């Protein structure tokens, strides 16, 4: 598997930058075309505040469960906003506006309306869309107004029912109260009772007060018990669904706080029976203590749960509150029941006439209280009906419509992101499948050293007036031929090869067009320049090039020398110590020629005459010539091309040429393009340039 580091990553991008730019430009062009062809779409927004049910009273005291109730109300209103019934009403209203041609069915509205609950708030958003600004605004305005009227109508109907019920009950209660008052008047006349003594009056008042408190507490107890049962059922359902188990600690502390709360409630009851007003300082102090217990309990409960889930934790806290509240009410009922029993005993000891009289008085007192309560509720219902209290407030019916589609910035950002994603994916997939040499380490993994790298500073192949290609050292500027790299290669070869009294170097490559002939020519020139008598031999007998590089005739040359035993085919160049032997005349079978004994004899002869013989040969995997010559030379120099030579081909070449004899000196990486430019390269040339 191919390994990547930062250098390889950036080098891959650099190598394929043209492809990346093309894909990116295509992606951006597509985004621009799509943007200009897409019809514009506008959006307007209405904001609704949900305040809760204004008609119903609060809990006995505020609990964390109130958020559940409000959340449920938000979801209820959200579903009403999405309902088919509401949309039909909206459609009917739209027919009276200029938007009637845009919305001809409920489905048209559904496609262009979205409802959203704003997180962490009690706000609902209605968003209306259309291809025209004014239509989007009209849709949003009509929808929000219709919703407000719809909720108000439902609320008004509820209020009307309450008003009708209380009015009917008032009439019945009025008749019953009138009947009781008549009965009391007749009883007083028949039994000639004018008034009661002070003791009986006090007993009667105590019974009335205790009975009133008992009835209120009993009604509240039943209400709270029903709430607690519902909460427990709701909690169990959710606990099972979420597979969540609440584990409580400090149960003794909770029980102690529960007992204290009960005692305070009983103490408050006694004070109320004794004639203290709810605003009295003593009662206020008791209520403050109860509040402290609630806060302490909430704090204890918060630290009580293991692995808390907010929703269930709040439910559990609420249940604990309700249980304490219910136990306090039960204690209050028990105490009031005891007092009532005590007063009933005292009442039973009175004469029969007085008992009947007190019973009638008590019945009238109770009926009067109920009558007052019903009348109060009836008046409240009238006010609510007139005020149209709905529990929602329209913050804004619509906002100025804004263009949401097409978004040029969004499309461009998406195009750039997708273009880069696709281009990088394509590039790195291609790179992963590409097995060419991409770094020096790729070669070193094959246990062969890289003696030098020849930078790809200039691939310009234009010719000068003499027809000599500009990348050959003797005829060109050193800046365009990387002369310093060849000097480094010469140094490496001098240390590894020439010191062992070896003279013949075969230069080859795995495939064509890897620059082996250029390197052979430049290396020969560098060695000759250093004072070594050097012979450059062109044994690429199929496609010889050495003679053209130095503007020589191809023949007579090597083939003529071997076949015809000609002497004097070696050409002396204008450059000191550099001699060249061209390929010679074309022959049908170069491999057969190279196997002749005359080749070995010739090599032995030139070894005595020259300090260094550099032989340029065909690519190793194309012709058998290289395998034949590899056995006759002292060392082999492999030429590889950066981002061109296939690693499997290089590996095959090494196996073929090495053959257990370790003749391969090393490798030269040609056309090398590292991540960083050779910024210091020209520094090496200053001492070789002539002063102007």
Image: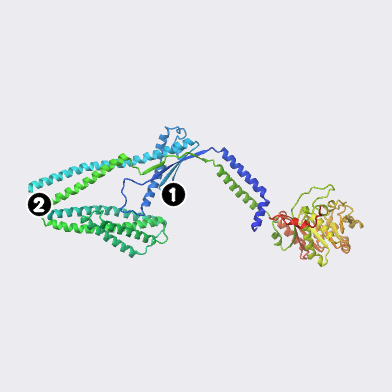
Q: Does residue 7 appear in the picture of this structure?
A: yes
Residue holding disc 2: 353
369 and 351: which is toward the camera: 369
Nearest to the observer: residue 489 or residue 433? 489
In-front residue for pair 36/531: 531
Q: In which quarter of the image is the N terminus?
A: bottom right
> Where residue 80 sits in the image (x, y, percent)?
39, 43
How far apart marks 2 and 1 lie (CA) works out to 68 Å
Q: What element carries label 1?
A: loop
Tell whether label 1 touches label 2 (CB within 8 Å).
Answer: no
Image spot of residue 477 (x, y percent): 80, 52
- Tell me if 136 is positioned left or right of 561 in this view: left
Residue 676 is labelled as none
Classify 10 Å Cα crowding around label 2: few (below 14), some (14-19), many (20 and above). Answer: few
Q: As drawn, which residue projects farthest toward the front?
A: 692
Snapshot quadrant of residue 655: bottom right
How many numbered discs? Answer: 2
Q: Position of 172 compared to 402: left or right?
A: left
Q: How crowded is mark 1: few (under 14 residues within 10 Å), some or many (20 or more)?
A: few
Q: Mark 1 points at which residue?
A: 119
Q: Is residue 640 visible?
A: no
Residue nearest the observer in this picture, 591 or 521: 521
Q: Where is residue 518 in the image (x, y as percent from the top left)?
A: 80, 54
Image quadrant where residue 510 sits: bottom right
Viewed as shown, does residue 281 lie left or right of 80? left
Mark closer to the chain start, 2 or 1: 1
Camera-nearest label, 2 or 1 = 1
Secondary element type, mark 2: helix
Q: In this view, does 179 lie above or below 524?
A: above
Residue 233 position within the rendered picture, expressed as x and y whole percent measured from the top left: 34, 55
């Amino acid at each position: 598997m191919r390994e990547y580091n930062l250098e390889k990553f950036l080098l891959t991008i650099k190598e394929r930058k043209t492809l990346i730019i093309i894909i990116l430009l295509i992606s951006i062009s597509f985004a621009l075309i799509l943007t200009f062809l897409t019809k514009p779409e506008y959006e307007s927004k209405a904001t609704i505040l949900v305040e809760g049910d204004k008609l119903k009273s609060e809990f006995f005291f505020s609990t964390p469960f109130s958020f559940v109730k409000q959340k449920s109300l938000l979801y209820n209103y959200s579903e009403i906003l999405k309902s088919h019934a509401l949309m039909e009403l909206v459609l009917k209203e739209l027919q009276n506006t200029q938007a009637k041609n845009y919305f001809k069915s409920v489905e048209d509205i559904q496609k262009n309306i979205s409802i959203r609950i704003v997180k962490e708030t009690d706000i609902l958003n209605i968003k209306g869309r259309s291809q025209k600004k004014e239509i989007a605004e009209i849709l949003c305005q009509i929808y929000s107004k219709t919703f407000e009227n719809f909720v108000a109508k439902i609320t008004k109907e509820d209020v009307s029912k309450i008003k009708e019920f209380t009015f009917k009950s008032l009439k019945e209660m009025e008749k019953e109260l009138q009947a009781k008052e008549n009965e009391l008047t007749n009883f007083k006349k028949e039994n000639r009772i004018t008034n009661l003594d002070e003791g009986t009056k006090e007993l009667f008042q105590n019974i009335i007060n205790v009975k009133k408190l008992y009835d209120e507490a009993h009604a509240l107890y039943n209400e709270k018990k029903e709430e607690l049962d519902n909460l427990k059922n709701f909690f169990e359902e959710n606990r099972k669904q979420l597979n969540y188990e609440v584990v409580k600690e400090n149960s003794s502390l909770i029980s102690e706080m529960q007992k204290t709360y009960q005692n305070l409630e009983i103490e408050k009851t006694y004070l109320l029976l004794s004639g203290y007003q709810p605003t009295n300082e003593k009662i206020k102090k008791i209520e403050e203590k109860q509040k402290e217990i609630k806060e302490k309990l909430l704090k204890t409960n918060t630290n009580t749960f293991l692995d808390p889930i907010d929703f269930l934790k709040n439910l559990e806290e609420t249940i604990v509150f309700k249980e304490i509240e219910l136990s306090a009410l039960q204690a209050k009922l028990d105490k009031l029941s005891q007092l009532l029993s005590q007063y009933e005993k005292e009442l039973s000891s009175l004469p029969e006439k007085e008992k009947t009289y007190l019973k009638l008085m008590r019945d009238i007192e109770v009926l009067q209280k109920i009558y007052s309560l019903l009348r109060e509720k009836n008046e409240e219902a009238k006010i609510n009906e007139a005020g149209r209290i709905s529990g929602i407030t329209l913050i804004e019916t619509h906002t100025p419509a804004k263009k949401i589609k097409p978004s040029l910035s969004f499309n461009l950002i998406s195009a750039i992101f997708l273009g880069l994603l696709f281009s990088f994916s394509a590039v790195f997939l291609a790179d992963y499948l590409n097995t060419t040499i991409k770094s020096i380490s790729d070669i070193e993994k094959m246990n062969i050293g890289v003696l030098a790298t020849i930078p790809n500073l200039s691939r310009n192949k234009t010719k000068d007036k003499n027809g000599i290609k500009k990348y050959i050292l003797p005829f060109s500027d050193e800046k365009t031929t990387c002369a310093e790299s060849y000097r480094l290669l010469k140094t490496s070869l001098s240390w590894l090869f020439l010191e062992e009294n070896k003279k013949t170097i075969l230069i080859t490559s795995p495939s064509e067009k890897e620059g082996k002939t250029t390197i052979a020519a430049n290396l020969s020139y560098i060695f000759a320049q250093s004072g070594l008598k050097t012979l450059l031999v062109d044994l690429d007998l199929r496609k010889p090039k050495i003679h053209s590089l130095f503007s020589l005739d191809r023949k007579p040359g090597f083939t003529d020398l071997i076949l015809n035993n000609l002497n004097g085919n070696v050409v002396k160049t204008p450059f000191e110590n550099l001699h060249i032997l061209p390929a010679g005349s074309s022959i049908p079978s170069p491999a057969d020629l190279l196997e002749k004994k005359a080749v070995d004899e010739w090599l032995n002869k030139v070894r005595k005459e020259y300090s260094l013989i550099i032989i340029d040969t065909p690519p190793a995997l194309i012709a058998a010539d290289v395998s034949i010559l590899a056995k006759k030379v002292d060392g082999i120099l492999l030429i590889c091309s950066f981002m061109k030579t296939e690693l499997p081909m290089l590996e095959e070449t090494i196996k073929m040429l090495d053959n257990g004899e370790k003749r391969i000196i090393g490798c030269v990486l040609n056309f090398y393009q590292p991540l960083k430019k050779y910024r210091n390269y020209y520094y090496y040339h200053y001492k070789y340039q002539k002063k102007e």
